[in-house]
Amino acid sequence: MIEIDGSYLEGGGQIIRTALALSTLTGKPFRAINIRKGRCHAGLKNQHMFAIKALKEICNAHVEGDILGSESLVYIPRKAKPKSLTIDIGTAGSITLLLQALVPVYIFGDRRVVLRIRGGTDTKWSMPIDYLINVLVPHLQKYADISIEVLRRGYYPKGGGKIKLRIAPKYRLEDIYNKTTEHEDLRINLCSQSKLIHIAGVSHASKDLMKGNVAERQAKAAKIMLSKSNISPKIRIEYCDSLSTGSGICLWAIFSDNDEINYKNPVIMGADSLGKKGKKAEAVGQESAERLLTQIQSQGAADVYLSDQLLPFMGFFAPSNINASDVSSHSKTNIYVIEKFLPVEFTIEGNKISSRKVLD
């Protein structure tokens, strides 16, 4: 039974999401205490409950403490059998946070699956759905064919967003660990930016904000700020039917040596910003552009959030290396959990994160 302290460093819900994914994949049970002690409202939240419920269905796990607000959890998995699921988180619970626990399990499954999920697509404290699609997923395509269709956006507080995610695995984890599958090309090696070749984005808003040209104003402000990069950004405008009023913008920058994206090891950095009542659309666009420029100017090959998302795959396919724009406490917390489940050791030197295999 692996023991996990949920209050370690950043002490957030990522500890539970990562532990659930790796426990299901490796078959190693864990006990977590002090869950989300680092947050104002401690204990399991709604999106954790749905992650536990989904993974429990996949691997017929024995679970203790799966109660909203619980600060302890015991999770004992059996053999995982990924299957298609329909999940309704309710309200604006983050779809992307839920997927952090599910996607690694499905990527190394034994069949094609479809996940239909209802909840929040663009919410605070989580990556927006456009970041998932355009920044993170391109890095995961070497492990599985992944496509995501946004059927409706979900803003706070009502949520109601809908997505359809399809995953077709290319490898089974046991084959990789048994070395029946060559995995040299599956390692994460994001060492340098190369040349900035493209900036793109999506500026979106609920239809009730169309008269105020909110999405256009967000995009225009971002473009003005991004003119400093000497690249003309292509930002798509989108208005959507949604249950709540909301807006946001997500931007991403693509780098390459030869003016074409390297699909085996892409270098993509992203940034985003959400609108809210009383916040001008121009401020939203400018904020996201400033964040992206900061990532670009860091000379890193992965933004601070992307490097955090890729850490489990650095654990599966060590040795791997990432030169990040920054290394957050969130990433260090994630490393703490990964090293509990996988025979891997991480080192951090400045903003460079490296992984290497150790004896199990």
Image: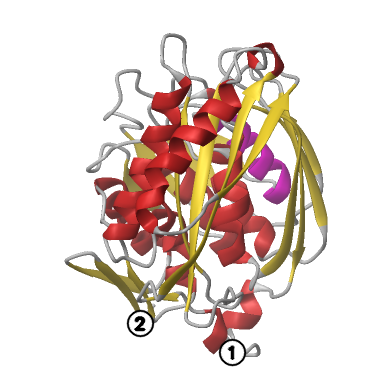
- Residue closest to the eye, 188 or 313: 188
* Marker disc for residue 66: none
Image spot of residue 273 (x, y percent): 44, 33
**Residue type of the residue flagged with mark 1:** Lys
Q: Is residue 169 left or right of residue 64?
A: right
Residue linked to disc 1: 179
Asked if the residue at tag 2 contacts the one at tag 1, i.e. Cβ–Cβ closer than 8 Å, the answer is: no
**Residue type of the residue flagged with mark 2:** Leu
Residue at position x 68%, y 39% in the image: 54
Q: Is residue 27 above or below residue 212?
A: below
| Magenta part of the chain | 47-59
10 Å neighbourhood of mark 2: few (<14), some, or many (≥20)? few
Residue at position x 23%, y 64% in the image: 351
Image spot of residue 328 (x, y percent): 26, 50
- Residue closest to the eye, 304 or 245: 245
| Callout 2 secondary element | loop
* Marker disc for residue 359: 2
- 31 part of magenta stretch: no
- 58 part of magenta stretch: yes
- Residue closest to the eye, 149 or 22: 149
- Residue closest to the eye, 303 or 89: 303
Q: Is residue 339 above or below residue 51?
A: below
Q: Quadrant of the C terminus?
A: bottom left
- Residue 154 sits in which quadrant? top right
The nearer-to-camera label among 1 and 2 is 1
10 Å neighbourhood of mark 1: few (<14), some, or many (≥20)? few
Look at the magenta stretch and give its main secondary structure: helix
Residue 230, visible in the rendered structure? yes
